[in-house]
């Protein structure tokens, strides 16, 4: 039996996920692929990009509609485990 942990979020909800990595095509592709694996649809304006001052790093903010804490945990777990992702918040 899977036990749901307590959360302050009310599901379903829109949730912004921030993902950081080196500014290259692999990072962007990996981040999008992982998120799309867990979330079937993304709104047209769901993704915002911001480069670091020297353009070495890229921060993506991806707003996803999640239906449970388990879904959100799965997204973060997979993002955090990939070598191309430096950080996921």
Image: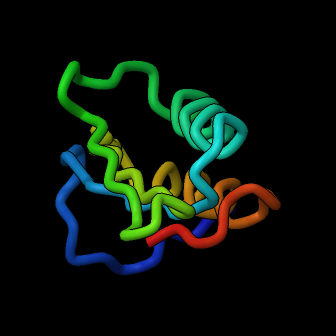
Which residue is at a point 36% across and 20% down the rendered structure image?
41
Nearest the viewer among 12 and 58 is 58
Q: Quarter-wise, where is residue 46 in the image? A: top left
Q: Eyeballing the image, is 42 above or below 18?
A: above
Farthest front residue in view: 54
**Image position of 64 (left or right of 79):** left
Which residue is at a point 34% across and 43% down the rendered structure image?
67
Where, quadrant-wise, is the N terminus in this rendering? bottom right
Farthest right residue in view: 83
In percent of width and height, residue 14 lies at 20, 46
**Image position of 80 (left or right of 65):** right
Nearest the viewer among 19 and 15 is 19
In percent of width and height, residue 8 lies at 21, 77
**Image position of 30 (left or right of 47):** right
In percent of width and height, residue 75 lies at 56, 52
Where, quadrant-wise, is the C terminus in this rendering? bottom left
Q: Eyeballing the image, is 65 above or below 60?
A: above
Nearest the viewer among 83 and 43 is 83
Which residue is at a point 50% across and 49% down the rendered structure image?
71
**Coloration mode:** rainbow
Whether residue 69 can be seen here = no
Whether residue 26 can be seen here = yes
Which residue is at a point 56% across and 62% down the rendered structure image?
56
Q: Eyeballing the image, is 34 above or below 72?
A: above
State how many labels appear: 0
């Amino acid at each position: 039996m899977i036990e749901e942990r307590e959360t302050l979020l009310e599901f379903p909800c829109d949730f912004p996920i921030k993902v950081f990595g080196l500014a290259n095509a692999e990072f962007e592709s990996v981040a999008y692929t992982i998120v799309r694996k867990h979330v079937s649809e993304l709104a047209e304006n769901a993704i915002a990009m911001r480069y670091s001052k020297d353009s070495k790093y890229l921060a993506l903010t991806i707003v996803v509609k999640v239906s449970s804490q388990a879904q959100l945990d799965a997204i973060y777990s997979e993002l955090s485990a990939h070598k191309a992702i430096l950080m996921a918040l």
